[in-house]
């Protein structure tokens, strides 16, 4: 929300920031939930999955700069975006994003906003910690299992057929009052198996976003921020360019993209 251009589209002569505010509010709820789990002893050290990483939004050319000024003027007044800064000064921007400003034509019209309060989350590490917390509370976490069938019975309960994917492959069935599908893109197939009317008409296209990764310390050290650019006019939303400082598995790296990915698998 601090730097995502797609959350603040142009609207007439102004900018609509309502989605950015809503996303930021939900993000704060997530942080509060994790803090609660920490007080309950269910999450250990938050620094294993969340770090402070300033967020920037980059604008190129007069049209984008005008948009960024309007975005900044509206968001900087909101408490959740307090402290956001705007600059077109080359020396200031060089301090914020030294790698991006290196060798850039001084005549180019560029601008940045900067939010010191940005964060970076290693969701893989967080997922592992949440799984451990779930088991600590008595939950049963089954890895290497696939739900192959999902049917609602006349009683209103759900009957799931689950197959094991390891060497002891076999199937079992589970009955439950509720089923939560949180399997990313794979949730599409699960929902189709459920035959709920809401899934009709949905499909998955075989495209994705791929990122280049740099792990050279001498390069990574020159870019301490997460930066989003603005997609070109007429380009799809997933084409918004990123140059992100990330910490994944305790390792510092840069991610640049997205680039279009393709798979021959077509889910419908």
Image (cartoon, helix red, strand yellow):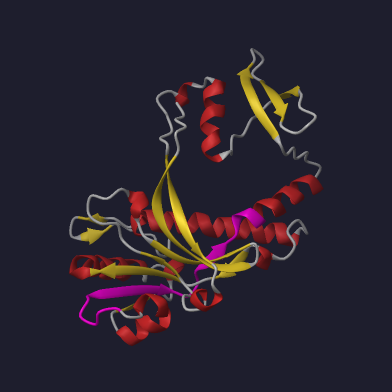
Whether residue 49 is situated above or below residue 142 in the rendered picture: below
Q: Is residue 183 left or right of residue 92?
A: right
**Seen from this angle, which residue lies furthest bottom?**
91
Q: Nearer the viewer, residue 29 or 257?
A: 257
Q: What is the magenta range?
A: 104-125
Relative image position of residue 15 (x, y in whole percent): 26, 59
Q: Nearer the viewer, residue 163 or 67?
A: 163
Whether residue 11 is situated above or below residue 53 in the rendered picture: above
Q: Residue at x 25, y 69 (%)?
A: 60
**Seen from this angle, which residue lies furthest top?**
154
Relative image position of residue 150 (x, y in whole percent): 62, 22
Q: Residue at x 47, y 78 (%)?
A: 222
| Residue 63 occupies quadrant | bottom left
Q: Residue at x 46, y 56 (%)?
A: 211
Relative image position of residue 73 (x, y in whole percent): 30, 70
Query: Disc count in the image?
Result: 0
Tell me the quarter of the image containing the N terminus.
bottom left
Q: Residue at x 18, y 60 (%)?
A: 13
């Amino acid at each position: 929300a601090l730097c995502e251009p797609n959350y603040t589209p142009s609207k007439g002569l102004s900018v609509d920031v309502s989605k950015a505010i809503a996303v930021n509010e939900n993000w704060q709820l997530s942080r509060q939930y994790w803090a609660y789990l920490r007080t309950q002893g269910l999450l250990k050290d938050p620094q294993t999955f969340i770090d402070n990483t300033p967020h920037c939004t980059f604008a190129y050319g007069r049209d984008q700069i005008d948009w960024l000024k309007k975005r900044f003027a509206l968001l900087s007044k909101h408490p959740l975006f307090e402290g956001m800064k705007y600059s077109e000064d080359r020396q200031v921007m060089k301090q914020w994003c030294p790698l991006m400003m290196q060798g850039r034509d001084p005549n180019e019209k560029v601008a940045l906003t900067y939010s010191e309060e940005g964060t970076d989350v290693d969701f893989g590490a967080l997922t592992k910690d949440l799984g451990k917390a779930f088991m600590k509370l008595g939950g049963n976490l089954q890895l290497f299992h696939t739900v192959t069938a999902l049917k609602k019975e006349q009683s209103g309960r759900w009957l799931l057929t689950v197959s094991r994917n390891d060497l002891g492959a076999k199937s079992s069935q589970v009955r439950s009052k509720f089923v939560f599908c949180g399997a990313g893109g794979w949730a599409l197939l699960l929902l189709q198996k459920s035959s709920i009317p809401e899934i009709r008409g949905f499909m998955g296209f075989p495209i994705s976003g791929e990122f280049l990764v740099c792990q050279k310390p001498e390069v990574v050290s020159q870019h301490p921020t997460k930066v989003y650019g603005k997609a070109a006019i007429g380009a799809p939303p997933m084409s918004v360019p990123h140059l992100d400082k990330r910490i994944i598995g305790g390792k510092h790296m840069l991610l640049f993209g997205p680039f279009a990915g393709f798979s021959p698998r077509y889910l419908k």
